[in-house]
Image (cartoon, helix red, strand yellow):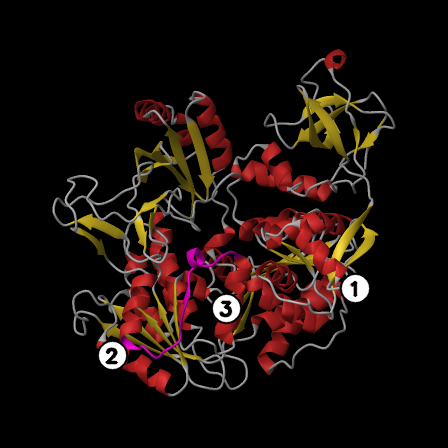
């Protein structure tokens, strides 16, 4: 690691500022490449990383000295290379990548002691709502210790409530090191008994980790096949060899069940990194990843940017899940960047899914990735029986959405003491509110989007910008009263219909907008798994790996919903979603079933789901994409031009279209401009262009040259999404 003496010019990548490293003079005591430093930027003090020798862009006489070096483990060369590669691939300014990699509070503060409040076994002398919230906060986070201010914020109580509990001995105050060490994990802890297929798969993954160096493997197993237990064996091998492991999960609500399995396997809880982790534990996890004491980290996509000291394994669970794509700020796909980081670190990457993305399937088919299959469910469980209900034949009455065959099937399961799930991938009560007098559809004032009725909240909500308004009784356009109508179903309306059909059933709704945070959602999922509901009604969140032992029937209300529109991934997403939802059924001893309501049972996607011909679906989908030159057999970049002045936005978009020669010279095509499918969000008008090229084209270089040829004014934003997942 190169050292720079005091006063020597160095390049520093800042967490904000320009899109490239800036030159400074090394501070007293000197610095090394990778050191975290405080740097002056105008009148402010900002965080930065010493990137290497000075760029020479500014005269040495004009360079300002750095304020000082921070007491933090330096950023390793591999991490700096990873950030630079991600920035280059996604066309993201380097400061945004440095900011992603330093999102932990107090990095520049020296180690110190602090007070932590911990829960004892003594109950309070009396229950109050405030005290109950304090106890619930401890329970939600596994009875971890909390700083007093953090606990007040999490529980929504005053310091006086904590003092009262402390006086009674319900909680105790401890003075500890500011960032306590994580408990040791036992790599030799007992795992679950594995089937023959699981044991063979685990042995292959262990061998890959033991061999060292980079490797990538698709772990494709049907729902309920025990993929988690298999890749935990790879984690055990990684820990035994003194390296660190990272497991990425697509949904924060999954973390509670997963953490329990990790604790049972390795004897202690791992470090966590996601939006639900408090500031104290974020700093603790960041520092522990950097010094190597966090041996296993479980987290959301941003955990990929933690400063691991000796990363040996990255697992991307449910690798097909769309939530791995970051859709604002730095636009990256954590699945792809996990492969990149593993290649730089010389680590193993495991991509696990029952319904892999076409990109991963194609990489395995071409031999770029290894592939391990788990074709059967674990133990006595079997895959659910699949059947379609043709809604052209068995249409329900007008204003109803549950067909008679589905109603009979649900009634039979409930009578047998089993659980049933009704799936509809649409939040709220109704997607459209319309005036029957004049035909006005109630839309958002800031977006070109209809407002969705959320009757349980008594509000209309824009799902683009989050704006809300009361549900109107008078038409905002013609002023006629009593003619407003909610059209179409959401899960709330489906729950209303279900209550009329099965009034004695205990019903639970799983939808992200109906949960008061991740803790509430986890509690609801655990209650369902424990048998506290008979009928579950849910959106796509029910597809994300949950295990409900009593659930034996899944009814898909509108299988055609995702097949609408011009999204090139429509069939792939529909296949994955319905397959995953159906996979919640029959995961224990009782045989499960899935009934799919559709108006087009002959659609190739639905036929593949019903027949179980996964490989046939992927081959057909791959053939269509290859003929179209679409990913993964071609490259795409989506460009959105946006601003508050619509005419100015179109002017910039047309100028970009006229300046497309650098793209054409590189072998890429440019389509557009055209209005975005949602042409206005948060008051900003949006126009889209699309760049498409063969796979071997250096698309990023061509994009940079193109954008430089037609620079946008400051009041118009040009966003570039390399490998877009959506086209809204």
Q: CA distance from mark 3 to mark 1?
A: 29 Å
Query: Residue 525, which numbered label?
Result: 3
Q: CA distance from mark 3 to mark 2?
A: 27 Å
Magenta stretch? Answer: 501-517
Q: Nearer the viewer, residue 408 or 152?
A: 152
Magenta highlight on residue 508: yes
Q: Nearer the viewer, residue 681 or 56?
A: 681
Q: Quadrant of the N terminus?
A: top right
Q: Nearer the viewer, residue 598 or 233?
A: 598
Which corner quadrant of the image does residue 642 belong to? top left
Q: Residues within 10 Å of mark 3 (few under 14, many from 20)?
A: many
Magenta highlight on residue 93: no
The residue shown at (43%, 58%) is: 514
Find residue 67 and report its horizontal and vertical position in percent.
78, 25
Find residue 239 and report its horizontal and vertical position in percent.
75, 64
Q: Quadrant of the C terminus?
A: top left
Q: Residue furthest left?
A: 437
Earlier sequence position, callout 3 versus callout 2: 2
Find residue 488 and report its horizontal and vertical position in percent.
24, 58
The residue shown at (76%, 69%) is: 187
- The residue at which mark 1 appears reads as 184
SS type, badge 2: helix
Comparing labels 3 and 1, the label whose residue is closer to the camera: 3
- The residue at which mark 2 appears reads as 405
Q: Is residue 222 visible?
A: no
């Amino acid at each position: 690691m190169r050292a720079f003496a005091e006063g020597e010019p160095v390049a520093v990548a800042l967490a904000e500022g320009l899109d490239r490293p800036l030159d400074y003079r090394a501070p007293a005591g000197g610095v090394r490449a990778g050191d975290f430093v405080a740097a002056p930027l105008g009148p402010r003090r900002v965080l930065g990383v010493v990137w290497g020798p000075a760029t020479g862009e500014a005269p040495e006489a004009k360079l300002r000295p750095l304020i000082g070096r921070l007491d933090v483990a330096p950023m390793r060369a591999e991490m700096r290379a990873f950030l630079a590669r991600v920035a280059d691939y996604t066309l993201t300014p380097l400061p945004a990548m440095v900011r992603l990699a330093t999102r932990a509070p107090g990095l520049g503060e020296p180690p110190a002691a602090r007070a932590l409040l911990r829960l004892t076994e003594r109950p309070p002398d009396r229950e109050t709502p405030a005290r109950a919230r304090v106890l619930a906060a401890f329970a939600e986070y596994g009875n971890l210790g909390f700083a007093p201010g953090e606990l007040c914020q999490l529980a929504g109580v005053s310091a006086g409530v904590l003092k009262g509990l402390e006086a009674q001995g319900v909680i105790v105050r401890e003075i500890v090191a500011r960032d306590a060490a994580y408990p040791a994990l036992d790599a030799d802890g007992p795992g679950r008994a594995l089937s023959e297929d699981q044991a063979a798969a685990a042995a292959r993954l262990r061998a890959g980790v033991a061999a060292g160096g980079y490797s990538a493997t698709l772990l494709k197993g049907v729902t309920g096949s025990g993929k988690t237990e298999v890749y935990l064996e790879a984690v055990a091998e990684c820990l035994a060899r003194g390296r660190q492991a990272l497991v990425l999960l697509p949904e924060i609500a999954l973390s509670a069940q997963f953490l329990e399995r990790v604790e049972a396997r390795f004897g202690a809880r791992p470090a966590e990194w996601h939006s639900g982790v408090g500031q104290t534990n974020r700093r603790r996890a960041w520092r522990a990843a950097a010094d190597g004491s966090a041996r296993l980290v479980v987290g959301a996509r941003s955990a990929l940017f933690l400063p691991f000291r000796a990363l040996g394994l990255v697992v991307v669970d449910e690798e097909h899940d769309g939530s791995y794509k970051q859709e604002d700020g730095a636009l990256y796909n954590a699945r792809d960047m996990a492969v990149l980081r593993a290649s730089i670190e010389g680590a193993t990457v495991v991509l696990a899914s029952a319904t892999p993305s076409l990109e991963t399937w194609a990489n395995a088919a071409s031999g770029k990735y290894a592939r391990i299959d788990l074709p059967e469910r674990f133990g006595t469980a079997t895959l659910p029986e699949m059947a379609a209900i043709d809604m052209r034949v068995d249409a329900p009455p007008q204003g109803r959405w549950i067909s008679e065959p589905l109603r009979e099937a649900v009634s039979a399961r409930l009578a047998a003491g089993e659980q049933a799930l009704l799936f509809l991938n649409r939040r709220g009560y109704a997607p459209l509110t319309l005036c029957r007098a004049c035909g006005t559809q109630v839309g958002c004032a800031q977006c070109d989007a209809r407002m969705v009725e959320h009757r349980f909240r008594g509000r209309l909500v824009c799902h683009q910008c989050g704006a809300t308004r009361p549900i109107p009784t008078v038409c905002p356009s013609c002023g006629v009263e009593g003619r407003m109508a909610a059209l179409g179903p959401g899960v709330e309306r489906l729950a209303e219909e279900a209550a009329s059909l099965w009034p004695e059933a205990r019903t639970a709704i799983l939808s992200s907008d109906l949960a008061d945070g991740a803790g509430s959602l986890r509690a609801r999922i655990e209650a369902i798994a424990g048998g506290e509901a008979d009928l579950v009604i849910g959106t796509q969140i029910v597809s994300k790996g949950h295990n409900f032992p009593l659930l034996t029937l899944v009814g898909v209300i509108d299988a055609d919903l995702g097949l609408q529109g011009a999204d090139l991934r429509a069939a792939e997403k529909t296949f994955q979603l319905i397959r995953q939802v159906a996979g919640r059924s029959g995961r224990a001893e009782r045989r499960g079933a899935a009934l799919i309501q559709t108006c087009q049972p002959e659609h190739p996607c639905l036929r593949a789901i019903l027949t179980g011909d996964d490989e046939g679906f992927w081959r057909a989908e791959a053939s269509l994409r290859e003929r179209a030159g679409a990913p993964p057999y071609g490259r795409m970049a989506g460009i959105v031009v946006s601003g508050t002045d619509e005419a100015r936005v179109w002017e910039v978009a047309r100028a970009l279209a006229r300046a497309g020669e650098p793209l054409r010279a590189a072998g890429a095509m440019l389509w557009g401009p055209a209005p975005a499918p949602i042409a206005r969000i948060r008051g900003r008008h949006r126009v889209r262009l699309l760049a498409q090229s063969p796979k071997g084209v250096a698309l990023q270089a061509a994009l940079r040259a193109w954008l430089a040829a037609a620079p946008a004014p400051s009041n118009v934003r040009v966003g570039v999404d390399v490998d877009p997942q959506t086209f809204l």
